[in-house]
Amino acid sequence: MPFSCPLCHAPLSRREKSFVCPQRHQFDLAKEGYVNLLPVQHKRSRDPGDSAEMMNARRAFLDAGHYQPLRDMITDILQVRLSTQATAVLDIGCGEGYYTQAFADIAQQHGAQTLGLDVSKAAIRAAAKRYPQVMFCVASSHRLPFEDCSIDGLIRIYAPCKAEELVRVVKPEGVVITVAPGPRHLMELKGLIYDDVQLHPENSGEIAGFNVEEKQSLAYEMALSGPEAIALLQMTPFAWRAKPEVWEKLTATDEFRCQTDFSIHCLQRES
Ligand SMILES: C[S@@+](CC[C@H](N)C(=O)[O-])C[C@H]1O[C@@H](n2cnc3c(N)ncnc32)[C@H](O)[C@@H]1O
Ligand SMILES: [Zn+2]
């Protein structure tokens, strides 16, 4: 396991139910099987990341299959690009693990292990409970608790990150796959909230230290039931701005049509 100690950065070794470093900093496994590598002094708030409510909404929405075309596209890219010698795949900002599990199916074929990281404890707890094949940790993507050059494939779907940390942990010639919103992503949902809907700015996908190998976009229309549209709103930052009329309108709707537009980049670490 390529974990490193969040306090002294030395490698962590697995003991029965914990991870320990040579300086005896110890991190116990939770009963769900994940490890919390986010020391209190590195927390920016008491309960950082997505709340349990957002996580539940995201799980309900993803379970309904609306983002399955996206998951299929990323797993196809990973299948082709992941080195046959790979030992570790990492999903940062993995949320409740919907995509992470699909990456684990591929990593397993290569004999590699899969790791999922998120700053939200509620999300990691739910992820670890449902997907025991993946090793999940609570940590921030701004300080990745992994050894230098230890990751062969890193996936980042709508999650924050720090370029220096990606360069540090990804092996030379390792791959990074990123997903960001394309210009028209969730336009109709935004239209309910803003008078003047701005298109999302195009994302170049560039990260210092990596070469962009592949750019793709994926766009399709979803037909959502009222409860599914509510779940979509709850899992986005737009929820904070939505007035009561918006919630009422979506609750009463039979079908809400909404566009997706994803911008996917595959990068390779310079050797
Ligand atoms: C929009 S969600 C995407 C979740 C998942 N990748 C998906 O698409 O279903 C963003 C995720 O990033 C997590 N997050 C936010 N800030 C983070 C940070 N500094 N480090 C790690 N994860 C973070 C949130 O808790 C949330 O689960
Ligand atoms: Zn330590």
Image (cartoon, rainbow, N blue to C red):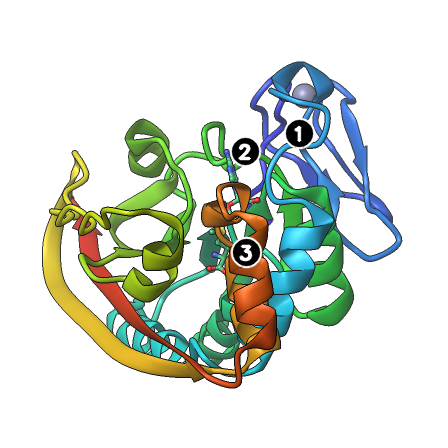
Q: Secondary structure at mark 1?
A: loop
Q: Residues within 10 Å of mark 3 (few under 14, many from 20)?
A: few
User: Which residue is at 72% across, 19% downward?
Assistant: 40
Q: Secondary structure at mark 3?
A: helix
User: Which residue is at 24% across, 50% downward?
Assistant: 197
User: Which residue is at 59% across, 78% downward?
Assistant: 63
Quick check: 133 above or below 135? below
Q: Which residue is mark 1?
A: 38
Q: Is the shortest distance between ligand 1 and the CB of mark 2 under 8 Å?
A: yes
Residue 8 shown left or right of residue 35 in the figure? left
Residue furthest top in the image: 41
What amino acid type should be assigned to the residue bearing mark 1?
Leu
The answer, for residue 115, to whether it is visible in the render is: no
**Depth order, front residue of 91/186:** 186
Quick check: 170 above or below 69? above
Residue 209 x/y as whole percent: 17, 36
Q: How many angstroms separate mark 1 from mark 3 (CA)?
A: 39 Å
User: Which residue is at 40% across, 39% downward?
Assistant: 160
Residue 52 shown left or right of residue 219 in the figure? right
Q: Earlier in the sequence, mark 1 or mark 2?
A: 1
Q: Earlier in the sequence, mark 1 or mark 3?
A: 1
Quick check: 65 above or below 70? below
Front of the two marks 1 and 3 = 3
Q: Which residue is mark 3?
A: 245
